[in-house]
Image (cartoon, rainbow, N blue to C red):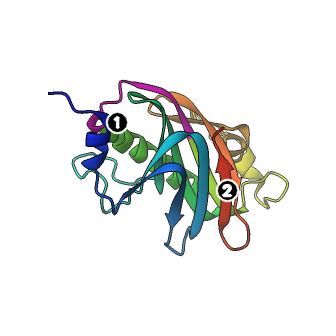
Amino acid sequence: MKFNLQTRLGWLDSHHVQHGNRVRVVEANEEGEAEVTISSANPLLVVNTSDKNALRYLTQRKVADGTVCEFLSDDAVILHLLECKRTVKEKSWQQVKEQFHGALLNAFAVCGVLNVKQIAEVRLYTAYREDKLDPVATANPSLLKAPVGGKQPAPAIEWQQGRVRILEHQFSHQKIQLDHLGLASISFN
């Protein structure tokens, strides 16, 4: 069966998606309360996934706050996964990576529904107000040391380097500093 992209977009619940060249990822939970406005010359689709509406048949049910598909064509996208946290510290950084993992799996399902044949790239973003992994600001120097026998870099180093390993792949990671109200804007141009 053949269905065009507009028909497939119509299958998505309008309470959980937005599309256009300017969209918002909103986290209302007090732990990460934030609003990130995203703009692009390319069409965007935001899927607001939560732990409650993530695909229940997947083993990883924690998901990032927003999955953004940037359409390069009707069947090719760049996936942007965004998580919002009030404060990033060692424990919350580990949670963010788990949420990226779950969001990526859910994004694969969305891409299947939309008949996306090519995911050109996956980019990860963390929007935050306070950075407790900053090597200058941290009071805990152990955050800068790699775990003994571990394959993962030290949390603070991984946070600073701009690359995150999820599902055995390295993806770019960008930090987004929120203002005191929890707001930020980014452009994918």
Quarter of image, res 177: bottom right
Residue 91 seen anywhere in this rendered image of the structure: no
Q: Secondary structure at mark 1?
A: helix
- In the displayed structure, 101 sits above or below 135; it is above
- In the displayed structure, 181 sits above or below 59; it is below
Quarter of image, res 139: bottom right
Q: In screen coordinates, is 30 left or right of 51?
A: right
The residue that appears at 19% across and 28% down in the rendered structure is 2
The magenta segment: 111-123
The residue that appears at 63% across and 57% down in the rendered structure is 127
Where residue 68 appears, as percent x and y from the top left, is 48, 46
Which residue is nearer to you in this view: 147 or 130?
Answer: 130
In the picture, the quarter occupied by the C terminus is top right
Number of residue marks = 2
Distance in Å between CA atoms under marks 1 and 2? 25 Å
Amino acid type at mark 1: Cys
Pointer 2 residue: 185
